[in-house]
Image (cartoon, grey):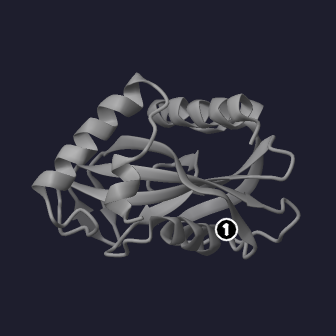
Amino acid sequence: MSWIESIINYKTYNEQEEKDKEIVVNCIKKFDDLLTRDNEIAHITSSAFVVNKNRNKALMVHHNIFNSWSWAGGHADGDDDLLYVAIKEVKEETGVEDIRPITDEMVSLDILPVLGHEKRGEYVAPHLHLSVAYLLEADEDAPLIVKDDENSDVQWISFEEINTYSDEPHMKVIYSKIIAKIKDSHI
């Protein structure tokens, strides 16, 4: 299934996802460059909510730009295999090598605002991340590394503490939604 079909066929969880999906699908119809940062208004990103075997902790990174704890992920940068992108980003940002998708389907579809910021000495204007996210599993005893140019720490955080660690209100809503999905579906 193509990345476009996976978004079109995505089963929304709540009203927020319904509206975000509608907008993402409209963007797909209007733009042919959503997989690249050439589209400075909005582009596809792929992230991962990585859980441990017991499904009670998530692997989080302290993101340098946002100065907050968050999931690992990044830009598609032209790659249309969004699950691959999510896994690659987790490996790069955490050092964990053995990462398994719990399912090949997306676990979350969101539109995330990005404020203007500096990256590698250049200004990046405000834009939107059309965010797809996947649910992955990793061994919480695997060695972790920090990717200095992107994050300042990596650690497993219990589900109950994620909202204490995260400083981004819009991301707290997403993490809570994914945790609820995990508990509702007994994944």
Q: Position of residue 64 (x, y in %)?
A: 50, 58
Residue 125, by quadrant, is bottom left
**Quadrant of the frame with the C terminus:** top right
Residue 160, by quadrant, is top right
Task: Read off the residue under disc 1.
Answer: 94
Q: Is residue 64 visible?
A: no
151 lies above or below 21: below
Taking the image as shown, residue 36 lies to the left or right of residue 146, namely: left
Please name the residue shown 45% across and 65% down the image: 82
Q: Position of residue 4 (x, y in %)?
A: 32, 58
Closest to the observer, 5 or 144: 5
Please name the residue shown 36% across and 43% down the image: 112
Q: Position of residue 134 (x, y in %)?
A: 56, 54
**Amino acid type of the residue tagged 1 in the rendering:** Thr
Q: Is residue 57 visible?
A: yes
**Quadrant of the frame with the N terminus:** bottom left
Residue 18, by quadrant, is top left
